[in-house]
Amino acid sequence: MRARLIEPNNGPVISKEKEIVKEMIELYCRKKHHREVLCKDCQDLKNYAMLRLSFCRFGEDKTACSNCKIHCYKLRYREKMKAVMRYSGKWMMLYHPIYSVKHLLNK
Ligand SMILES: [Zn+2]
């Protein structure tokens, strides 16, 4: 039996979102966990988030994750991602007002 090949998303919308999410997690870890390099836990979350985005079934048509009807995150990651978004959201607005952070936070 051959596994069905699914191409990971790498269009501009997904790529941009990955970039933002990555920065938000890094910011969170730096400020909250006082690390220069991502701690194991945050690294794990980052890998997970990148994977979810790569295989988001909506691809380039995706809406804000918080607005999505399909909760593709496992609960454990969802809770942590919520905390990251809450925490890093306000910093991102200061550092990168040009980014569509508002879209991400669905506000
Ligand atoms: Zn951390």
Image: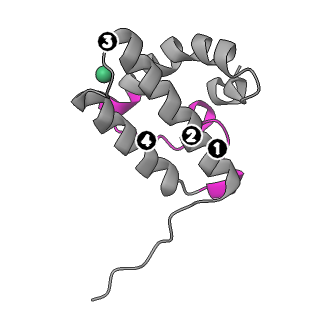
The residue singled out by tag 2 in the image is 19
| Residue labelled 2 has its Cβ within 8 Å of some atom of ligand 1 | no
Quote the CA–CA distance across marks 1 and 2: 5 Å
Label 2 close to label 4 by CB (< 8 Å):
no
Label pair 3/2, CB-CB below 8 angstroms: no
Q: Looking at the image, is mark 3 or mark 2 earlier in the sequence?
A: 2
Task: Tell me where residue 10 appears, x and y as whole percent.
Answer: 59, 60
**Real-space CA distance between mark 2 and mark 4, rounded to the nearest whole angstrom:** 11 Å
Q: Which residues are magenta?
A: 58-78
Quadrant position of residue 79: top left
Front disc: 2 or 4: 2
- Name above or below for residue 28 compared with residue 59: above
- Callout 4: 10 Å neighbours few (<14), some, many (20+)? many
Give how far across and how far down residue 95 sits, in percent: 65, 17
Label for residue 16? 1
Residue topped by disc 4 = 49
User: Circle 4 sits in a helix, a strand or a loop, which is it?
Assistant: helix
Give the residue pinned by disc 3. 34
* Front label number (3 vs 1): 3
Beta carbon of the mark 3 residue lies under 8 A of ligand 1: no
Q: Compute the Cα span from label 4 to label 3.
A: 21 Å
